[in-house]
Amino acid sequence: MPPDSPPAEAPAPVEPHPPFEPPSLTALFLAFAKMSLAGFGGVLVWARRGIVEQHRWMTAEEFNETFALCHFLPGPNIVNLSFVFGSRFGGFAGGVAAFAGLIGPPMLIAIVLAALYARFGEIETLRRILAGVSSAAVGLLIAVVLRMMMPLVKKRDVAGMLMLMAVFVAIGVLRLPLQVVLLVTVPLSLLVTWSLHGRGS
Amino acid sequence: MNAPNQLWTLVWTFALMSLFAVGGANSAIPEMHRVAVEVHGWMSDKEFADMFAISQLSPGPNVLIVTLIGYSVAGVFGAVAATLAMCGPTAILAYYVSGLLRRSSGSRWPVIIQAALVPLSIGLMGASALILALTSDRNWVAALLTIVAAALAFATKLNPFWILAAGGLLGFAGVI
């Protein structure tokens, strides 16, 4: 899971565009399947490694831009990225190939694990192990949240911190439905951000 | 409820949820918990925590917790339906938006939208952590494990796998 944080690093030094050789649909499928299966603890790192360093399908800068786009759109970021990336090379079919590679194989593994859990989930030992894993996994999630908060803290972004707390309380403490909370906070946050940073700059 | 109905509920629930999942799968966990445990009663708190643990242990994107939820509701078809519903619509949306943006590059809007959404998605992930902590950490030892894991993951570059494995080991030993 963890550092699925937004691409924070400075834009890479401008390098010549990688030698262009559009990957086939099969190559897209296999490349994304490989990244996804390697991607224990977050696929993003592996996706960057595979796309930018290994296959040289994109420069680091192009990758960051594509990821930024997928980060502000709703839905699982890395899944969005696979589709957008695949479609650059193979149109809609390319998008589907990359998407299927990213989702398909790990989904099969998840189904096997789900079946095992349904069959053996009641076994006391397994329950204890999973309890330990889930307590640790919550800790990992907290660490991701803290890491993502650091830029806001450093910038002393009071408005951002207030929005963050408001969402945290509304969802985490009051348990309000997601849609209701977002329908209020998204426009509000856009307005605040636009009036603070957008105008004039 | 009969099987086709269950499938339809899964598809509808996750497709709708994905459109509101700003900041990715981890932001949607409170909503998944609300829907699966509180609204539909598909599973207990404990089972939800287990699924989170399993999804962290298995390879691939974190969103695959919906595969596990789908399976527990409606078997293999449920697993596939829930996964595609959660991932498909937003991926296609991203495809069209990226096409549009490439034609109007140079706009400041993507930057502003992203800056506006980042605090919201961190807030959502914080809420996820809180809800999962309340469901997972039933005693002070478990809470302590969460805190130590958070500190280690925040302050060191230790591979998260070892932190999860240590948690599993402590659970196995009966410490939790």
Image (tube, coloured by chain):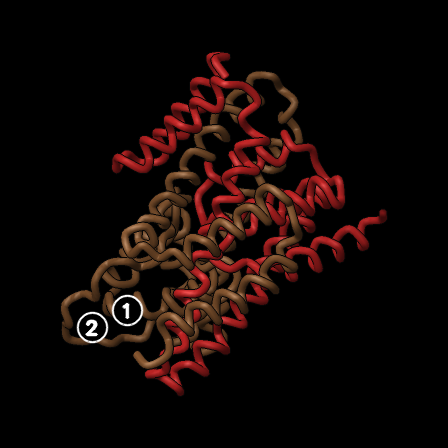
Chain colours: A brown, B red
Q: Return the x and y of residue B133 as percentages of the image width and height.
A: 53, 32
- Numbered disc 1: secondary structure: loop
Residue sitting nearer the eye, A140 or A201: A201
**Residue annotated with mark 2:** A18
Q: Return the x and y of residue A95 as percentages of the image width and height.
A: 46, 70
Asked if labels 1 and 2 touch by Cβ distance under 8 angstroms, the answer is yes
Q: Pinpoint the chain carrying mark 2.
A: A
A181 horizontally vs B106: left or right: right
Question: Which disc number belongs to residue A87?
Answer: none
Q: Return the x and y of residue A61 as percentages of the image width and height.
A: 25, 69
- Numbered disc 2: secondary structure: loop
Rendered residue at 53%/52% (across/down): A167
Residue A201 falls in image quadrant: bottom left
Residue B108 falls in image quadrant: bottom left
**Residue annotated with mark 1:** A57
Rendered residue at 37%/65% (across/down): A67
Q: How many numbered circles are shown?
A: 2
Q: Is B168 rendered above or below residue A186?
A: above
Question: Which kind of residue does numbered mark 1 sit on?
Answer: Trp
